Image (cartoon, rainbow, N blue to C red):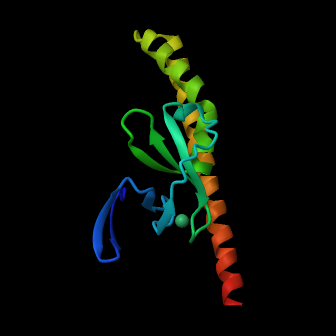
Amino acid sequence: MGLNLIDLNLWGYKINVMNIAIRLKNCPSCKSVNLFRLNGVSYENEFNSMTDWDLKRKFNCRKCKIELGLFVHNISREEKMVWIDMLKCEDPYHKYLKILQTSKEKFKNRSQKYYETLDEINGIQNKIKLDKIKVKIKNKIINKGMFIRHVN
Ligand SMILES: [Zn+2]
């Protein structure tokens, strides 16, 4: 959900301002809406799996406080809200998984090598899944802690 067109009312003149750098995005974790402004700066994007994307904004969700990144695709300008800790779970394996997928294609004859590679891929994907669950649980515990502090 990008908000590129804004109606401004200046001294009685209604002005459409194109491409004003305001965005309304839902947090991928708690779904609450975050309103923010792009400041024209790109942040350092150290993620192997996001090489075609610019990291345009980094901030913490106003509600659940997780770290979020707004990535914009170099060519299509598609925008993606990413939970940074989730990306960190899968990103280190990105290159190696690609290599394994290519190898698997080569061993299409269902040889021993094919199954070994498939096993390795599944092992890595399971590890990523588990790491993501850990992040979610950790996030829930932190938020619960905040809630309890709030009540007291
Ligand atoms: Zn949130």
Q: In terms of depth relative to the viewer, which is nearer, 46 or 5?
A: 5
Q: In terms of depth relative to the viewer, which is nearer, 6 or 25?
A: 6
Q: In terms of depth relative to the viewer, which is nearer, 8 or 90?
A: 8
Q: Quadrant of residue 11?
A: bottom left
In this view, the residue farthest toward the bottom is 152
* Residue 60 higher or lower than 147, as above or below: above
The answer to whether residue 137 is left or right of residue 5 is: right
* Residue 98 higher or lower than 135, as above or below: above
Q: Quadrant of residue 91?
A: top right
* Residue 89 higher or lower than 142, as above or below: above
Residue 35, position as x, y percentages in the image: 48, 66
Q: Total number of numbered labels? A: 0
The answer to whether residue 11 is left or right of residue 57 is: left
Quadrant position of the N terminus in the picture: bottom left
Q: Residue at x 63, y 47 (%)?
A: 131
Can the viewer see residue 120? no
Residue 112, position as x, y percentages in the image: 52, 12
Q: Quadrant of ligand 1?
A: bottom right
Q: Residue at x 55, y 26 (%)?
A: 97
Can the viewer see residue 109? yes
* Residue 139 higher or lower than 117, as above or below: below
